Image: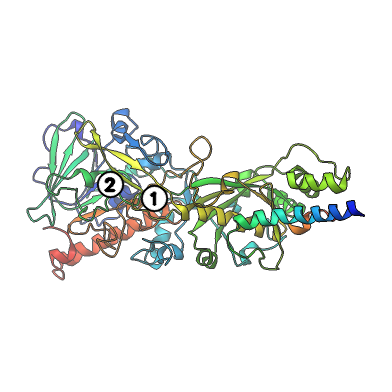
Amino acid sequence: MKANLGRRQLLKLLCLMPILYLQRYASSSHQRIHNQEEFLLVDGWILKQSDLPEY
Amino acid sequence: MIRDLHEVDSNPFRDQIIDVCICGAGVAGITLALHLSPRLNVLLLEAGGEEYSSESQSVYQGRIIGRDYFDLTATRLRFFGGSSNHWAGWCRTLDRSDFQSKPYVEYSGWPINKTELDPFFNRARTILDIRSSPGQENSWHAEAGVIGETEDFENIEFSWSRPPTRFGKKYREEIDKLPNVTCYLNANVVDIKLSDNHSAVERVEVRDYMERTFFVHARCLVLAAGGIENPRILLNCNSQVENGLGNEKGLVGSFFTEHPHHKSGEFILENAAKRKLAENWKNPFDAFQFFSPSESLMASEKILNAGLRLQPFELTPNDFEERLKRIICRSEIAQGIADAFLDTEIACLHGRRVEGKLHIASEQALNSESRVKLDFEKDRFGKQKIVLDWRLSEIDKRTVRVSTFRFGQVFAQLQLGRLRVSDWLLTGDDDINFPGPGEDEVGGNHHMCTTRMASSPHLGVVDSNQRLFGVRNLYVAGSSVFSTGGHANPTLTIVQMTLRLADYLNKRVFSLQAGTETVKEVGLDT
């Protein structure tokens, strides 16, 4: 249980990191365009949030 | 008639009444000579011969002190036909927005609108043998989503001169046969002498490679020697005016502008986009697709214009999901997730193959510090060589970075594929270190804005009719008079502007002959 909680917190943090990373380099203050979809910057790749596997 | 100055014994220009003397037989010079009225006696002076020679080319030697650039003897050619002799043939007109002032960019906008050049498009197209882009029908992105309808990007077209028009080869015979045009080869313009009050050109000093000097008296002089040589000639004419002709405000040679050319990303394609592309795939060149930031994106993000070229170079099997998985697996963050939660659920595959690259040729903001100026070292004619100090600024970096990021988002959103942004764009705008030669293309060999057209001498060197401010019979032609560079390759615009100049000079001469305008209004000496 405790281990799962730790994993969930770690997952949340890890998922936030690329968003924060993209935010730093994104061209404007808004991260959502058109259909409000969020994008991530992962290793230089601009990915859709939905590209990440569901855990 | 085409003659070699080396083959004349006495001054061939003596006692001649020359209406228009053109310095430089490149794209602008030849176009102008061909389109001036047959009623005008035209002298076309070419510094080189009919073929490449190191003797002529070495006059282009210069030094580079700013951003690393191509060798100045390689980025242009100094013989009949000029740099069209190594032109690649890319054509596109400037955009309407290129002519408009942008409040967030100093020295933006032109004193004329695009509509003033549009009437010359069809004639320019014929001169340049422009054919349609073969990629226009291969709108492979249409299946997955029409990118032309997004707010942020427009799907744009380029055309090609195929094979690229070599002006020296194509128009040699026509120039030779025109009764009103005489072209002299190996004729180097080394000085321009003004009248006593410095308001008009009085004579042009010409020298051959045997060190013989000749003087030309012309009613009108047009410099058409290229974006680096036009300012060099003006700056070197400093015997009567301390800092060179037209340089009272120090703007001759300022604003050297290029089109920074860089790989800004690489991509993988979604299966649907790949299938559509495969239907029309004949060769990679046909598959190029071009995009440009919309006017609203430029305004909202305070960026300049840019041309993005989506360039597929490989069609792999329909394995988009597999490739996406590899990307995620390879990233450190995702690897951490996988390690922590998924254990062996994702089998990370090593090695990543992309299916194409995103290339960007962007507009450069005018920057008075980016310039050509005279060196201490002199050429064989005793004229000071050039120093090129090319500089890019934060907005140039931002234009490439923002365009790439936003394009990557649209690319993913429209289910075309996924884009990886090049590493050099993952730093802030204040880090203006662009990749240099050897790492990337760097530039397009486009030398622009060094005698820019402007509404006042405080902002540029020539007026809206390409006449040097303050000198009533000295004109400049070619990309050096561009007020801004846009992102499009300059040759088509050079031809359009030169046709406009020819029309202007023809009309002025006629009105002078008809007595409806004075010498001062017309700008030609009698």
Q: In this orientation, does residue B150 appear?
A: yes
Depth check, front residue: B111 or A32: A32
Label 2, on which residue? B230
Residue B198 shown left or right of residue B123 in the figure: left
Q: Measured along the vertical axis of the image, is residue B40 above or below residue B343?
A: below
- Label 1 SS: loop
Residue A27's x, y, as percent?
58, 59
Please name the residue shown 47% across and 56% down the image.
Answer: B395
Please name the residue shown 7% across and 53% down the image.
Answer: B196
In the rendered image, the quadrant that contains the N terminus of chain B is top left
- Label 2 SS: helix
Mark 1 surroundings within 10 Å by alpha-carbon count, few (fewer than 14), some (14 through 19), many (20 or more): many
Task: Tell me if label 1 and label 2 are in contact, CB under 8 Å.
Answer: no
Label 1, on which residue? B257
Residue B382's x, y, as percent?
19, 34
Residue B337 shown left or right of residue B404 in the figure: right
Task: Give the amino acid type for the residue marked by disc 1 in the picture.
Answer: Thr
Is circle 1 on the same chain as circle 2?
yes
Depth check, front residue: B329 or B84: B329
